[in-house]
Amino acid sequence: MAAFIASQWTEKEVKHFLDLLEEFERRVVRFPFSFPASEGYAGCRRASIHRNASVVYRVDEGIIHIVTVVDNRSSKTR
């Protein structure tokens, strides 16, 4: 994923986005069920990491699996 965003964004934007993901990772490890259930992905939870981006993940036997990162500006990602 980092290679894709690096090809689309500036270095500053990539660093900011990766910082947001790292912050999400720290929170979700401590509180995996604190984010609301996802409406569009059964059995998953959705964490907004920025007004334009959310992470959809699931917890399976204590392991956190990132399902996708979605663009909140698209109505198809709800």
Image (tube, rainbow, N blue to C red):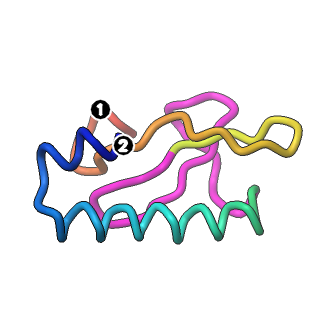
**Amino acid type, callout 2:** Val
**Can you tell which mark lies on residue 76?**
1
Residue pictured at 55% horizontal, 30% vertical: 41
Most extreme residue toward the top is: 42
| Of residues 34 and 55, the one drawn nearer to the viewer in this rendering | 55
Earlier residue among tags 1 and 2 = 2
| Of residues 71 and 15, the one drawn nearer to the viewer in this rendering | 15
Report the label total.
Answer: 2
**Residue that numbered label 2 is attached to:** 70
Q: Is residue 27 above or below residue 9?
A: below
Residue pictured at 60% horizontal, 42% vertical: 57
Quarter of image, res 12:
bottom left
Q: In this rendering, would 63 be left or right of 28?
A: right
Q: Position of residue 74 (x, y in %)?
A: 23, 41
Label 2: which secondary element: strand
Q: Position of residue 75 (x, y in %)?
A: 26, 39
Residue pictured at 63% horizontal, 28% vertical: 42
Q: Quadrant of the N terminus?
A: top left
Cα distance, mark 1 to mark 2? 9 Å
Image: magenta residue range:
33-55
